[in-house]
Amino acid sequence: MPGTKEIFIRIDRCVGCHTCEIACAVEHSAGKQLLAAISEPVKPRKRLYVEAAQNLAVPVLCRHCESAPCVAACPTGATYRDESSQLVLQDHRKCIGCLLCVQACPFGMMGRRAESRVTVKCDRCPERERPACVDACPTHALVYVDPDVYGKTKRLAVVEALAGDYLRGEA
């Protein structure tokens, strides 16, 4: 869908501070404040994960897949594709806690609530202009932008590097 923004990950900028995870959990808490969230009876859950791999910190989050296996696996329709936003979302009232979506997700992005088997996943913070994880990232490792703009930015960086190599006689 043209003009739809996506969250892109710039792995080279992630320092593994987990600020994005905290911001996500707080955004999905009842009070939406860090200190209040810590003491809430229903603990807020993060919906993205910063994992370590080969000396790198790598943020991983739901890709809202075009052909979403989690949607196909859900027997109740609790995990579904929203027609207007095209995001893969959840209706927690319909979730029966079967965890089939957890098994189906190729990225391991389906979490579950601490107090039950009801699953949770990224909803891109629908009440916000930009997702909380993106706004919180101090190194701008997460960017929220149209895919065409992101692609052009990457192409321009490659062209600049190649031009610099050429001018230095390295190409």
Image: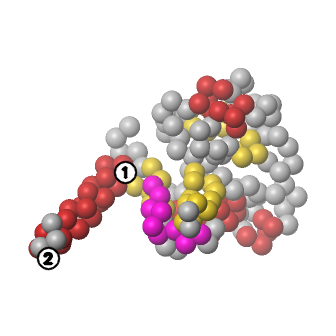
State the residue at coordinates (81%, 57%): 43
Mark 1 lies on residue? 146
Mark toward the start of the polypeptide (2 vs 1): 1
- Please, what is the three-letter code of the amino acid marked with disc 1? Asp
- Left or right: 12 in relation to 20: left
Color encoding of the figure: secondary structure
Callout 1: helix, strand or loop? loop
Identify the image quadrant of the N terminus: top left
Q: Marks 2 and 1, how far apart in space?
A: 34 Å
In this view, the residue farthest toward the top is: 75
- Camera-nearest residue between 85 and 43: 43
Q: Is residue 13 above or below residue 77?
A: below
Would you name the residue on which mark 2 appears? Answer: 168
| Residue at image point 45% right, 62% down | 10
Q: Are marks 2 and 1 in contact (CB under 8 Å)?
A: no
- Mark 2 residue type: Arg
Nearest the viewer among 19 and 35 is 19
Asked which secondary structure carries label 2, the reply is: loop
Residue occupying the point 40% across, 45% down? 4
The residues colored magenta run 8-16
